[in-house]
Image (tube, grey):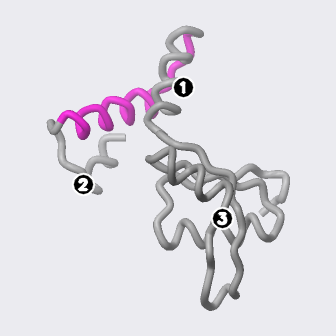
């Protein structure tokens, strides 16, 4: 992988968090997208603690919150510019349906995208 690439990990759990921490430590431009602003701030300032096969270290990883806002922004900007963003449109609608209780979180949802 080219270190000029920008990497975004959306919804990092244990695995995504470790991957992001290791990539950041190796010099890759890595950003996490998490759901809660408090968590984004904590990870950006205090970092992710890694203990295990990848070593033992703590490293701050740039983080932002609310991916649905980013996805929604891309969809609305696409509409404004006349550029189709079908994946963002579907993903934004899907997140809204989940938040409204009209849809359950399930891996099969991604088959629609």
What residue is rendered at 16% in x and 39% in y? 101
Q: Label 2 belongs to which residue?
A: 106
Looking at the image, is mark 2 or mark 1 earlier in the sequence?
1
In this image, 91 relative to 43: left or right?
A: left
In this image, 18 relative to 69: left or right?
A: right
Q: Quadrant of the C terminus?
A: top left
Tags 2 and 3 touching, CB below 8 Å: no
Tags 1 and 3 touching, CB below 8 Å: no
Nearer to me, 91 or 47: 47
Looking at the image, is mark 1 or mark 3 earlier in the sequence?
3
Relative vertical location of residue 105 with respect to residue 12 in this rendering, above or below: above
Q: Label 1 belongs to which residue?
A: 74
- In the rendered image, which quarter is residue 42 located in? bottom right
Q: Quadrant of the N terminus?
A: bottom right
* Image position, residue 81 (x, y; %): 59, 10
* Image position, residue 92 (x, y; %): 38, 31
Q: Crowding near pointer 1: few (<14 within 10 Å), some, many (20+)?
A: some
Task: Assess whether residue 12 is covered by the magenta stretch.
Answer: no
Relative vertical location of residue 104 with respect to residue 70 in this rendering, above or below: below
Looking at the image, is mark 2 or mark 3 earlier in the sequence?
3
Label 2 vs label 3, nearer the camera = 3
* Image position, residue 31 (x, y; %): 66, 51
Nearer to me, 92 or 47: 47
């Amino acid at each position: 992988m080219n270190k000029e690439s920008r990497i975004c990990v959306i919804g990092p759990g244990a695995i995504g968090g470790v991957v992001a921490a290791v990539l950041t430590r190796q010099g890759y431009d890595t950003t996490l997208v998490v759901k809660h602003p408090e968590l984004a701030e904590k990870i950006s300032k205090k970092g992710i603690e890694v203990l295990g096969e990848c070593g033992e270290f703590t490293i701050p990883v740039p983080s932002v919150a609310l991916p649905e806002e980013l996805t929604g922004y891309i969809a609305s900007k696409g509409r404004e510019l006349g550029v189709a963003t079908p994946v963002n449109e579907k993903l934004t609608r899907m997140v809204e349906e989940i938040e409204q209780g009209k849809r359950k979180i399930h891996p099969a949802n991604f088959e629609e995208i």
